[in-house]
Image: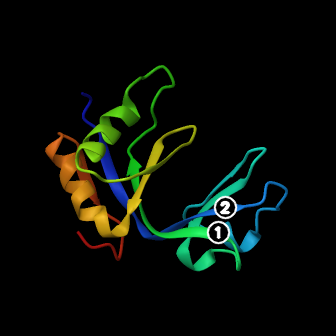
Amino acid sequence: MRSLRFSVLPGSWAVVRLPPDSDAPAAALVPPFHSVTRTPDELSLVCPDHAVPEGARAEAGWAVLVLAGPFPFELTGILASILAPLAAAGVGIFAMSTFDTDYVLVKRERLDEAVAALVAAGHEHVGYGPGEEG
């Protein structure tokens, strides 16, 4: 299994579902992190908990683990090396990928367990963002 470096992004995050014909609300698209994915069935957002659009279906209280990339597209097993130890620890995830790297969201109340499971699996935790506990 490949050893990776990861950090924890500061803040608390929500995964939001809106109807597929919705516009992405500008108030939810704030730094330092957000994501918008549209499919024929839904518009999904990841945004800070405080930016969830009123009336939207949302699951709040996530922490964001940032894998230290970039990773070449031909490299395999990146997410598997992170997700397997989390699955073995019983930690549920929401995974996302970008051009350069991968992000894994875990519920905030399970963050310490997630970090411990990843470190025990040989991954390097390079720190928490400002205001994060560990």
Q: What residue sits 82% from the left and 62% below the top? A: 23
At label 2, the amino acid type is Arg
Q: Quadrant of residue 76?
A: top left
Mark with earlier residue (1, 2): 2
Residue extending farthest to the top is 74
Q: What residue is rendered at 23% in x and 49% in y?
A: 89
| Nearest the eye: 22 or 2 | 22
Q: Residues within 10 Å of mark 2 (few under 14, many from 20)?
A: many
Q: Nearer the viewer, residue 80 or 35?
A: 80
**Would you place residue 73 above or below residue 114 in this image?**
above
Residue 107, image x and y in percent? 38, 64
Of the 4 image quadrants, the one containing the C terminus is bottom left
59 with respect to 93 (left or right): right
Q: Is residue 11 above or below residue 103?
A: below
Residue 7, numbered label: none
Farthest residue, direction right: 21
Secondary element under disc 1, as helix, strand or loop, is strand
Q: Secondary structure at mark 2?
A: strand
List the residue tagged with mark 2. Answer: 17
> How many labels, in total?
2
Q: Residue at x 44, y 65 (%)?
A: 62
Residue position marked by numbered label 1 in the rendering: 57
Disc 1 + disc 2, Cβ < 8 Å: yes
Question: Residue type at mark 1?
Answer: Arg
What residue do we see at 32% from left, 72% from top? Answer: 132
